[in-house]
Amino acid sequence: MFIGAHVSIENGYIGAIEKLHAIGGNCLQMFSASPRGWKLEYPKFEKDYIETFKTKQKESGISSVYFHASYLVNLADPLQIGFMSKKQLVKELLIADMFGIQGSIVHTGSFKNENPNYLKLKANICYALERMSKDILFIIENTGNRKIGKTMEEIGYIIKLVKDKRLKVCLDTCHLHAAGYDISNKQSLDRFLKFFDKEIGMERLELWHVNDSKDEFGSLRDRHENIGKGTLGLKVFETLLNHPDTRNYPFITEVPGIDGNGPDKENITTLKELTANF
C-alpha cells in the first residue's frame, strides 16, 4: 500500500526523500522550488545529484514522487500571470523528467470574470503538454472553493477539451468535503466513484490527497486538519484506504501536523493503522 506525505524541500530533493523515509512514508509529494515566488530559472542539477536522488528513492522503498505546482499558478489568466504560469510549469515538468518524478499536481487557477475563458485555459495547458515528455503527467487537482475544478463536471470538461492521455486527476478528501461530495461511508463512496467514472473516467485518477477538514460539509472552505481530528473523521479514511476500487492508489497527506510543522509520523501511522493490508 502507498501512504506518504507532502514534505518540505528545505534540505533539497534528497532531503525530502530522507524526511519522508524517516516518518514512515513510501510515496512523496514536494514543491520543485519555493511556492512563494515565480521560478522561471532553476539551478543546474548535476548528474551525480540526480543519480543520488534516484538511488535514495529506491533504497528507501519510495514508490512514486510527485511535484506540487506553485499556488501562484493560474492557467486561466489571459495576461501576464497566465504567461508566467505556463512557463514555470514547463520548467517544472522538464525537471520532473530529469529526476524520474511522475509529474506535477496543479491547481489550474480561477477565472477573473463571469465569462469563463476555457479556450485560454486549454491553450495554456496545451502549451505545457507540447513541451513536456510523453511520460510525464499533468495532474489536475479538484478544489474545495470557487476556483476551477470544484466540480467533477468541470474537470471532465477540461479533460475532454484538451484530449491528452497525460492529463490525470488528484482527488483531495478535504476539497471533496468542502465542495459537497459525500464519501463518508462505503455506499456514498461507491456512488461518488460511479459518478467520477461517468464524468471523468477512473483511468484518469492518479492519486489521492488524504486530508481531514477544519470546516463543515459543503462549506467551500478547504482548510486542512490532521487525520481524524476534523469534520471528516477516521471512518472516511478507513473506508477509502480499504475500498477495493481505491486502496491501490497513492495516498498523500498535506496536514498541519501534530506540532504544526506539516505532515509527520503520527499522521502517517494513523493512516497505516486504518488499513487492513499495509
Image (cartoon, rainbow, N blue to C red):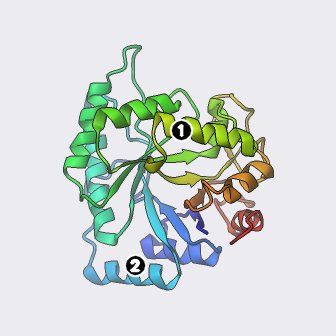
Residue 80 in picture, x, y percent from top left? 26, 33
Kind of residue at badge 1: Phe
Viewed as shown, does residue 17 lie left or right of 102? right
Q: Secondary structure at mark 1?
A: helix
User: Residue at left 55%, top 59%?
Assistant: 249
Mark 1 and mark 2: Cα distance apart in space: 35 Å
Point out the residue furthest to the top here: 114
Taking the spot 79% from the left edge, 50% from the top edge, the residue there is: 235
Mark 2 residue type = Phe
Residue 110 visible somewhere in the drawing: yes
Residue contact at pointers 1 and 2, CB within 8 angstroms: no
Name the quarter where the N terminus is drawn: bottom right
- The one of 186 and 1 positioned closer to us in this rendering: 186
Q: Secondary structure at mark 2?
A: helix
Residue beneath disc 2: 53
Relative to the observer, which residue lies in front, 163 or 78?
163
Rendered location of residue 30, percent (x, y): 48, 61
